[in-house]
Amino acid sequence: MRDYEYIGTAFYCKECKTFHIDAKKEDYYKYLHSKEWKELRLRRIEYDKYTCQKCGERIIKPYGKGLQVHHKSYKNLKTENEILDLITLCTKCHKINHNKRWN
């Protein structure tokens, strides 16, 4: 059984409980669970001092739990610049950001 399910052109990841765009590419899902992505994600969260860059909420938990790192663009996927291509958001702001794009 897969850890995710497709819903239209997106998929819901049961592990991180998040919807992801461009689900047609399973390698994207695999990348989000790779060691490389997890290290890059944590570096970005540390760079942003465990603070959502949208609402300013500060969440200090092990491995940045409660915070998500959003791709500003998918253009540089797998070769992201952690400063230019990514942003730290709390779960609420991340959902709001994606809902604005999908609606």
Image: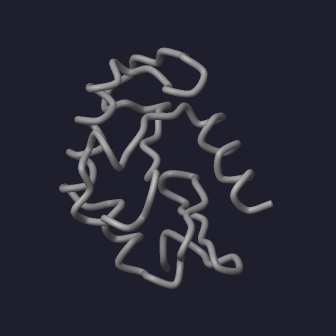
x and y percentages locating residue 7 in the rendered image: 69, 76
x and y percentages locating residue 59 in the rendered image: 46, 18
Point 24% across, 50% down: residue: 81
**Viewed as shown, does residue 69 lie left or right of 38?**
right
Give the vertical position of 33 relative to 68 (above or below): below
| Display colour scheme | one colour
Give the vertical position of 68 relative to 52 (above or below): below
x and y percentages locating residue 11 in the rendered image: 59, 71
Give the vertical position of 25 relative to 20 (above or below): below
Point 65% across, 53% down: residue: 98
x and y percentages locating residue 61 in the rendered image: 39, 21
Point 26% across, 56% down: residue: 80
**Viewed as shown, does residue 49 lie left or right of 51?**
left
Count of residue discs: 0
Tell which residue pokes out farthest to the bottom in this image. Answer: 24
**Viewed as shown, does residue 45 lie left or right of 58?**
left
Which image quarter holds the C terminus?
bottom right
Point 20% across, 55% down: residue: 35
- Quarter-of-image position of residue 44: top left
**Viewed as shown, does residue 81 lie left or right of 77?**
left
